[in-house]
Image (cartoon, rainbow, N blue to C red):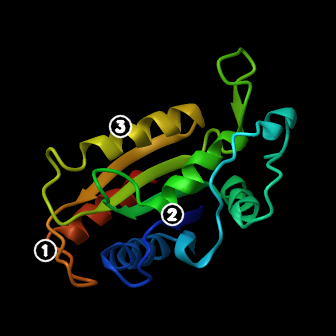
């Protein structure tokens, strides 16, 4: 299985990266391949709501000249997609939010009998690192993720929250590896 991890943190080597390192080792041990895309290293413009993408049925059709098209191509070619982020104000950081907003170009015929998606049927999971607890902290991001995946017709394998992360990069709590192993198993 080919898995694309979309790393939505503005920090290259923070807690989310440390969690993805563990996940990728686990997936390689299971015989899968992984590729990580660090959104802080690419340019993804916000959606302009021009709706030119709606005119295209078999490609994303977005007229913007940035790195989103290449990311979407990799997502479409993968078997599974992991959205990995630190929790920012109860939701996604700006880097990931811009990419999620651009998902509109991947969905065709929404609210019609012709509703399809260029990433439809892909297995997907959410990985969230956060300093605080999960309850009353990481609940909204999970709702947004579920709605986005329903819109894009993806198959959610799970939402995996790692609460209690320290402020220093790579300071994951003791149970982080167990949570990440459960996430890896969700793709089997």
| Label placed on residue 28 | none
* 174 left or right, relative to 120: left
* 186 left or right, relative to 149: left
- Foreground residue, 9 or 49? 49
Tell which tag, 2 or 1, sits nearer the viewer: 2
Q: SS for tag 3?
A: helix
Q: Residue 139: x percent and y percent?
A: 25, 42
Q: Which residue is mark 3?
A: 143
Whole-number angstrom distance, CA of label 3 to CA of label 1: 26 Å
Q: Is residue 62 above or below residue 131?
A: above
Q: Which residue is mark 1?
A: 174
Circles 2 and 1: CB atoms closer than 8 Å = no
User: Crowding at label 2, few (<14), some or many (≥20) Cα neighbours within 10 Å?
Assistant: many
Q: Residue at x 55, y 70 (%)?
A: 39
Task: Please identify the residue farthest to the top as the structure is shown.
Answer: 113
Q: Is residue 121 above or below residue 68?
A: above
Whole-number angstrom distance, CA of label 2 to CA of label 1: 28 Å
- Foreground residue, 180 or 37? 37
Of pointers 3 and 1, the one earlier in the residue sequence: 3
Q: Residue at x 45, y 42 (%)?
A: 156
- Foreground residue, 9 or 119? 9
Of pointers 2 and 3, the one earlier in the residue sequence: 2
Marks counted in the figure total: 3
Tell which tag, 3 or 1, sits nearer the viewer: 3
Q: Which residue is mark 2?
A: 95
Q: Residue 110: x percent and y percent?
A: 67, 24
Circles 3 and 1: CB atoms closer than 8 Å = no
Q: Residue 2: x percent and y percent?
A: 61, 64
Whole-number angstrom distance, CA of label 2 to CA of label 3: 18 Å
Q: SS for tag 2?
A: helix
Q: SS for tag 1?
A: loop
């Amino acid at each position: 299985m080919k898995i694309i991890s979309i790393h939505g943190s503005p920090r290259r080597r923070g807690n989310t990266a440390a969690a993805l390192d563990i996940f990728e080792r686990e997936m390689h041990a299971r015989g899968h391949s992984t590729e990580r895309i660090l959104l802080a290293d690419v340019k993804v413009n916000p959606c302009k709501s021009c709706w030119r993408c709606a005119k295209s049925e078999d490609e994303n059709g977005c007229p913007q000249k940035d790195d989103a098209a290449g990311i979407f191509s990799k997502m479409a070619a993968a078997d599974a997609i992991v959205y990995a982020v630190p929790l920012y104000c109860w939701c996604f950081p700006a880097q990931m939010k811009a990419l999620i907003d651009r998902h509109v170009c991947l969905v065709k015929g929404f609210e019609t009998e012709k509703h399809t998606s260029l990433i439809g049927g892909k297995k997907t999971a959410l990985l969230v690192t956060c300093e605080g607890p999960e309850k009353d902290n990481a609940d909204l991001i999970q709702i947004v993720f579920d709605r986005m995946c329903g819109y894009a017709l993806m198959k959610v394998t799970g939402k995996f929250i790692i609460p209690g992360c320290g402020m220093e990069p790579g300071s994951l709590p003791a149970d982080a590896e167990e949570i990440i192993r459960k996430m890896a198993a969700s793709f089997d």
